[in-house]
Amino acid sequence: MVPTANSTGVSYSIFFCTGTSWSTDPGHQLCRFDNVCLDHSTQRFQYFVDPTFAGMPLFYDHSGAAHFSFPENFVSTGHVTIKPYILPWAPTVVHRAIPNDAAYARQPVAVYASTNDYAFNYGHALFDFLYAVFNQLQTLQLYTPAFQLLLAQHQGTNADVINIFINPENPERSLLRLISHNPVLPLHMFVAPGSGSSGLTCIKTLVVGAAHMHLVLSRARALPFRAAAMVNLGVNDPGLARRPRITLLDKHGRRRIENLRQIAAALAAEFPLVQIVVQDGRSMERMSIRQQLEIMASTTILITPCGGLGTVSVFLPPGGTAIVMNYFNTAKNTSTQMEEPYYANVEYIDFQYFPVLPEDYEGTSDRPGCEGPKDAEHYASQGSLINCNVRIKDLWRMRMMVNAAVMRWAARDENW
């Protein structure tokens, strides 16, 4: 039933926060606000306090100072490593009861979060945004696929990038469907039926403060995220297949493995009983999110370039193996993994990082054009080959890494 008025019997708001105090480390606090209302005239959330207790503090900070309202930077809605680093937010305290005619939203929980320019990339949209939002809810034990994602501000220069992966024209290609049944809403569209009389839309629980989830990924397990995605999209998830399947991602654009089909042929000769599939990256990008998950759910071993598309590996079945290419960092003269901060906290997949050496960049079709100028952003830390294709020379090492993964699979299935 969709309530059209304040029939809950609740008159006032409450809140709970976890993480570092706003006053010592702004942006690292995660909060839930229960029974708060959006004032449509100001587009601000109101926090209702019994006027009888107007002289009592809402909270005390780490120094013991009493606060009777929320500081404007009480919570950050954004990503603390992306400029502007802190996107401050706080509800407005009003000393009165929630009006009797205030309408409640049909969604039980909403998350108020900011997007950023990284949303143009599959991996960043997945890990730097949706995974963090999901784990906000998980941390507070509030996750439900009926939650509503509300857009706060935008970090960066191109607010339209959210339309690529999170809010595309075709909803079947929206990554948001991994965790929510509801489309994303800007704040001005968050309007409950019957809210006109009071000018308010109330929500049972509002969650704000994604920032620390981006930095402390070890706090959050990834398996519940995968499980929710499979259920929400109705994907058959049988676990590790009875016959191992190796999927090789043929990515187009930057960091492509140009001799991927040669690698596939070598593996087919080495493992005649194993199914070998070369998955074209362009066709995969045109698929629905459900189809992408179905491919991963049926894969035992994934071989992928580093970069955003490879993060689809988190949807492999538990016990699967992802062999991810490194890139050669010319600034540090070493083989480096691009996504290790993400993959290190995925607890159910064996991530193997394939070392890439300078010789693997010889004879590729994209050089020297792929090599960034020395004044390019990140050049000093990532080197000139960060965006270049590779032609893997050491096929023996690849066969041995795959062999080890197949043996691990066989040890889990005594009937093979």
Image (cartoon, grey):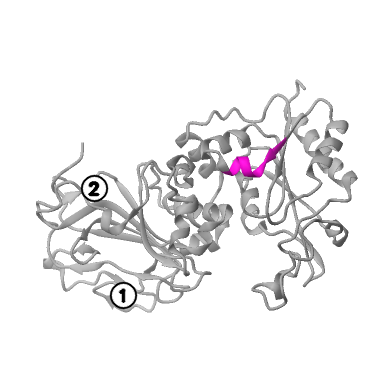
Q: First in sequence: mark 2 or mark 1? A: 1
- Cα separation between marks 2 and 1: 26 Å
Q: Relative to the observer, which residue lies in front, 111 or 248?
A: 248
* Mark 2: few/some/many CA within 10 Å (<14, 14-19, 20+): many
284 drawn magenta: yes
- In this image, 78 relative to 359: left or right? left
x, y percent for residue 82 = 51, 69
Q: Residue at x 68, y 50 (%)?
A: 252
Q: Relative to the observer, which residue lies in front, 86 or 372?
A: 372
Q: Residue at x 82, y 43 (%)?
A: 401
x, y percent for residue 298 = 64, 31
What segment carries the magenta color?
278-285
Q: Relative to the observer, which residue lies in front, 365 or 165?
A: 365
Q: Quadrant of residue 35?
A: bottom left
Q: Residue at x 65, y 49 (%)?
A: 310
Q: Which mark is residue 71?
A: 1
- In this image, 144 relative to 97: left or right? right
Image quarter hosting the C terminus: top right
Secondary structure, mark 1, is loop
x, y percent for residue 214 = 52, 61
Secondary structure, mark 2, is loop
**Where 45 falls versus 66 (above or below)?**
above
Q: Amino acid at mark 2?
A: Ala
Q: Nearer the viewer, mark 2 or mark 1?
A: 2
Q: Quadrant of residue 57?
A: bottom left
Q: Which residue is mark 2?
A: 105
Q: Residue at x 50, y 59 (%)?
A: 213
**What is the chief secondary structure element of the magenta stretch?**
helix
Q: Which mark is residue 342?
A: none
Q: Amino acid at mark 1?
A: Pro
Residue 128 visible, this angle? no
